[in-house]
Image (tube, grey):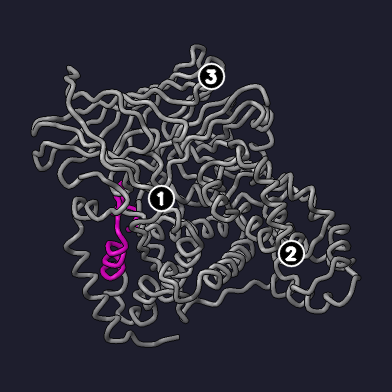
């Protein structure tokens, strides 16, 4: 542990604090978003009235986006972000006078700037448009790709900068707005949004929505399909396809307890209801924290509630991310590092310290693997990112999640949990429904904690964590008695095929997962066969265990698992599982040929967020 801040680091910290004090205004922050064409320092949106018609036959959305704007600088142009959207016309005011507009040059990641002619007094801009089949946010599923096999399905994934592919918007996390929406879908289907939602199907296929709180564009979400609702308690519930509803409701029965635990930690839940929508398996993430309606992958339905930490994570985003948002995608760790910390506090409250500690160890091991893979001097291992000119999805790694978590644990260790909890509670309250930068957080930490106890500065080593690569030496120790016992078991067992005692000692999903990861590289096919016979890893209902086991099977040519690996890769679209498996397969000539064969069948089931990454792996 480095005890003192070096002079250059101290100068850097001072400079950043000065810069932060100059950049507290929204306009200064917004100008610096490298992933948006918008001009919010001059003109910014404040409210959206959206009218959508969903066309499953042509796989497109006919839309009308009516934006209330604030012409701060009394300028003659407002700029929106678009990508692969056909603009049909643009009007101004309540009387819808047509105005001129132009589209800028195409950028690979950002799309095109939509520049609209306005007057200094303009307060309303309406854009008529149609989405394209290339709209990256939209995943259109035919009936065969759903659980019920009878009806089509549509869902959106707007994070990070994909909202612009289905709604012309100022697509920056630093710009917030309220919205109302009217959505027309085929009769018999239900529409849901990141807003106040229906619990019954509409007879005529028409649905209306209201989001009364200002949100950034990446939290705009829509899903349409054969869906039903089941309440968990008075303010939480589950949406899912009818055949999955009861199973999902059982799996997530502790949602109400989680909300109560979260409020106890960091203040009231500000969004009204908290519901979860279980999507078809093509969904590329574990979950997406759309306000009031988390989108979740069915891969967390393990049948034993062993993967419900995902719900705790997405719920925690209701504070860290949705209530207080990273101002740009270079500040992404402010969303995810805080949320992982909050998630584990919820898990500790509901399921106990041992469970939270095991997840902490698994997360830290994953972080070390990520940094080893990226290189410990890689600039992308800094918390404060720089993704200008790149897809901000490049920053969605364990750096934001687990290094961010470890930094906050370092602060907790230095300041004490009670003081840190008080600080976080005030942080969420002070910045509610606002977007903040890393430098805003640095300023808050200085004024809220460090200035009250100057000795914390040296203990925390804030600049090393935020602005330097790798893992600082002052990271708190991470351990679990249960996992330490597993290490001893593996060490004494690895030369023997006698595994009867393992079944008695490995009881939880986390213990089994850690055990698989702890197995030596020299493990033989005979050992794999014996373990599979005892634990049925190949046919596990836990997707986390399946992925870890399948990595071993590919690496060690354990052929009995091959048909199950193919089924898994064909049916599951979650990027977290797909990427490591495809990466492992392409390490050998035969494995790469096998991967391409599977991918040819599986790619239509994947969302663009997944297949864009895998295309590059298999090229």
- Check whether the beta carbons of the residues at disc 3 and disc 2 lie within 8 A of each other: no
Dot 3 or dot 1, earlier in sequence? 3
Please indicate, yes or no, whether residue 251 appears anywhere in the rendered image: no
- Quadrant of the image for the C terminus? bottom right
Dot 3 or dot 2, earlier in sequence? 3
Give percent across and percent down for residue 384: 36, 65
Which residue is at a point 46% across and 39% down the rendered structure image? 136
Which label sits in the foreground, 1 or 2? 2
Question: At numbered mark 2, what does the secondary structure look like: helix, strand or loop?
Answer: helix
In the rendered image, residue 438 lying in the magenta stretch gets the answer yes
Which span is picked out in magenta?
Answer: 426-448
| Secondary structure, magenta segment, majority class | helix
Give percent across and percent down for residue 600: 65, 42
Location of mark 3 (residue): 201
Give percent across and percent down for residue 123: 16, 30
The circle drawn on residue 319 is 1
């Amino acid at each position: 542990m480095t005890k003192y801040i070096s002079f250059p680091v101290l100068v850097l910290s001072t400079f950043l604090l000065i810069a932060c004090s100059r950049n507290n205004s929204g306009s200064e922050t917004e100008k610096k978003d490298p992933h948006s064409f918008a001009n919010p320092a001059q003109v910014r949106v404040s409210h959206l009235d959206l009218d959508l018609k969903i066309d499953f036959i042509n796989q497109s959305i006919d839309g009308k986006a009516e934006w209330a704007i604030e012409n701060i600088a009394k300028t003659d142009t407002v700029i929106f972000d678009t990508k692969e959207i056909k603009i049909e016309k643009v009007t101004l005011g309540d009387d819808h006078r047509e105005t001129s507009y132009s589209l800028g040059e195409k950028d690979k990641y950002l799309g095109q700037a939509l520049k609209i002619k306005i007057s200094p007094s303009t307060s309303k801009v309406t854009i008529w448009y149609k989405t394209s089949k290339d709209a990256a946010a939209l995943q259109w599923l035919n009936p065969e790709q759903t659980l019920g096999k009878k009806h089509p399905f549509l869902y959106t994934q707007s994070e990070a900068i994909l909202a612009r592919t289905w709604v012309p918007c100022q697509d920056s996390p630093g710009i917030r707005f309220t919205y109302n929406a009217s959505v027309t879908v085929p009769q018999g289907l239900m529409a849901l949004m990141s807003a106040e939602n229906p619990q019954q199907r509409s007879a005529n296929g028409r649905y209306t929505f209201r989001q009364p709180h200002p949100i950034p564009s990446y939290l705009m979400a829509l899903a349409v399909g054969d869906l039903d609702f089941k309440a968990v308690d008075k303010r939480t519930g589950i949406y899912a396809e009818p055949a999955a509803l009861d199973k999902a409701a059982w799996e997530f029965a502790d949602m109400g307890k989680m909300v109560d635990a979260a409020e106890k930690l960091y203040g009231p839940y500000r969004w009204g209801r908290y519901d979860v929508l279980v999507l078809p398996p093509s969904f590329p993430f574990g979950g997406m924290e759309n306000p009031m309606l988390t989108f979740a992958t069915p891969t967390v339905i393990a049948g034993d509630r062993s993967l419900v930490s995902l719900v705790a994570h997405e719920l925690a985003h209701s504070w860290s991310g949705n209530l207080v948002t990273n101002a740009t995608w270079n500040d992404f760790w402010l969303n995810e590092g805080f949320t992982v910390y909050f998630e584990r506090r919820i898990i500790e409250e509901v399921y106990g310290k041992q469970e939270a500690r095991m997840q902490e160890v698994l997360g830290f091991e994953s972080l070390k693997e990520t940094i080893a893979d990226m290189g410990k001097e890689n600039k992308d291992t800094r918390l404060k990112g720089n993704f200008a000119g790149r897809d901000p999805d490049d920053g969605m790694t364990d750096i934001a999640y687990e290094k961010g978590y470890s930094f906050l644990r370092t602060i907790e260790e230095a300041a004490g949990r009670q003081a840190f909890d008080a600080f976080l509670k005030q942080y969420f309250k002070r910045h509610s429904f606002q977007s903040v930068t890393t430098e805003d957080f640095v300023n808050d930490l200085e004024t809220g904690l460090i200035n009250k106890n100057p000795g914390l500065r040296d203990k925390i080593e804030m600049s090393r964590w935020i602005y330097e690569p790798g893992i600082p030496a002052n990271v708190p120790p991470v351990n679990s008695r249960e996992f330490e016992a597993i290490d001893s078991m593996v060490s004494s067992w690895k030369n023997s095929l006698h595994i009867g005692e393992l079944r008695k000692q490995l009881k939880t999903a986390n213990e089994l997962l850690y055990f698989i990861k702890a197995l030596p590289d020299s493990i033989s096919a005979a050992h794999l066969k014996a373990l599979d016979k005892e634990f049925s890893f190949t046919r596990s209902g836990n997707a986390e265990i399946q992925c870890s086991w399948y990595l071993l099977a590919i690496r060690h040519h354990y052929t009995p698992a091959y048909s199950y690996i193919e089924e898994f890769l064909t049916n599951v679209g979650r990027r977290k599982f797909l990427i490591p498996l495809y990466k492992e397969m392409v390490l050998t000539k035969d494995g790469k040929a096998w991967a391409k064969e599977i991918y040819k069948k599986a790619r239509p089931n994947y969302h663009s967020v997944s297949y864009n990454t895998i295309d590059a792996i298999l090229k």
